[in-house]
Image (tube, coloured by chain):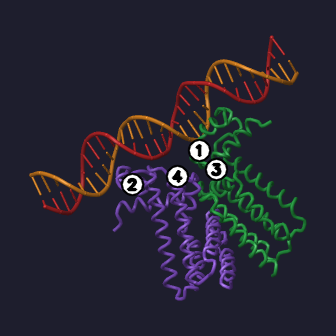
Chain colours: A purple, B green, C red, D orange
DNA sequence: ATTATACTATACCGTTCTGTATAGTATATT
DNA sequence: AATATACTATACAGAACGGTATAGTATAAT
């Protein structure tokens, strides 16, 4: 059973991704979610609070999905980082893919003082650290350096896919990632 | 002598980058530019028209700057593509850097039917084609493939820098680019 | 002297925005 | 029967939004 709170959260997530955050009013959110503003403001005290929760849940869902994929498919630590972009490709090419929350949010709120921008920045950093952990476990020397490069390829590919669905950019990101990973392992 | 039209264009460019496009009202633009709405609407018939002109001019300026740098510093075609990320680094780390227009615009207008999104997408494609031309002149076999990979690194690095100024991501993008270029030349 | 051009100043229109106030209903618990 | 919980319905406040209408000024060209 999904609570009304979850329904609002899911609706907002979808509308923010498809129409933009600033372009989506709370009136639209409650209309699509089939509830009223009173209920929305009971659970989320401000629109900013709702945005922050949407971002947190989206990132949590993505990270959990990816981590489950990696831990259930790979045995050796070195395999995990090699398979990383296979699952990223699966995610990006899925029909459900609507983009990466923190990438869009940081563009809509460019001021570094803004709480939404700060959360986006933090999520980007945490994802990079997650890749770094994978690289470390695979005994790669410059794990942080490789993780940064892979995250650039990742964010670039997501950006490309947000601009034009079915761009095929992820295929080339994968190739580049393989080259970078192989290069880092040999060192 | 700068006309009032240019003043409005420059002001809008700056405000869009620092505060976001949807978050910047026309009242703010004219107040900062030191003029009135009547004048703004004389030159730009709608806010959307102004946004499109801002994007076009920003991209033109960037492309011209980069092309001048490349043609005045490099003799051989193969040197051009190798120096590409040196100048991108110079651009990204400059104190004037406020981000890439089309990256932010595509995030604020995620709908692919939207004229602003379409222009952003076109500019991204044209920049990739520019890199592809450089790769072709350098006699690289899979010029399009390399260009796509380099553009992913570029957009990823710009994204990283937009999220956190002074991230240093461009240094690692440069290293990765070098590896990809060397790999593509050997083939 | 007249006319065109460029611009200012200000008030306004209709809409949409976030957020709240007020009143009422339906359901389950005690 | 009384009470708490969850929710709906609607109306509104106050500000900001994009865009326009009206009236007036300053300058230069004819």
Classify residue A132 as left or right of residue B96: left
Q: Residue at x 46, y 52 (%)?
A: A48
Few, some or many C-alpha atoms within 10 Å of disc 4 (few <14, some 14-19, many ≥20)? few
Question: Chain letter of disc 4?
Answer: A
Residue under numbered circle 1: B24
Which label belongs to residue A114?
4
Question: Chain letter of disc 2?
Answer: A
Mark 4: secondary structure: loop
Few, some or many C-alpha atoms within 10 Å of disc 3 (few <14, some 14-19, many ≥20)? many
Residue found farthest to the front? A141
Which label belongs to residue A44?
2
Classify residue B55 as left or right of residue D1: right
How much space separates mark 3 and mark 2, taking CA atoms? 29 Å
Q: Residue at x 52, y 88 (%)?
A: A75
Which quadrant of the view contains residue B92? bottom right
Residue under numbered circle 3: B17
Q: Are marks 4 and 3 in contact (CB under 8 Å)?
A: no
Residue A166: percent from left, percent from top: 64, 69
Q: Are marks 2 and 1 in contact (CB under 8 Å)?
A: no
Mark 1: secondary structure: loop
């Amino acid at each position: 059973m999904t609570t009304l709170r979850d329904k609002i959260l899911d609706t907002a997530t979808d509308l923010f991704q498809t129409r933009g955050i600033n372009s989506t009013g709370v009136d639209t959110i409650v209309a699509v979610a089939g509830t009223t503003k009173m209920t929305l403001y009971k659970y989320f005290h401000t629109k900013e609070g709702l945005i922050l929760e949407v971002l947190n849940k989206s990132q949590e869902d993505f990270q959990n999905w990816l981590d489950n994929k990696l831990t259930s498919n790979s045995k050796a630590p070195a395999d995990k980082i090699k398979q990383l972009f296979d699952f990223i490709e699966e995610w990006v090419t899925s029909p459900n893919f609507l983009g990466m929350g923190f990438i869009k949010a940081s563009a809509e709120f460019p001021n570094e003082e803004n709480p939404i921008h700060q959360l986006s920045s933090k999520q980007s950093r945490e994802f990079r650290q997650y890749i770094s952990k994978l690289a470390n476990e695979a005994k790669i020397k410059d794990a942080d350096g490789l993780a940064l490069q892979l995250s650039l390829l990742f964010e670039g590919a997501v950006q490309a896919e947000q601009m034009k669905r079915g761009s095929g950019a992820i295929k080339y990101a994968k190739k580049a990632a393989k080259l970078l990973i192989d290069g880092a392992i040999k060192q």
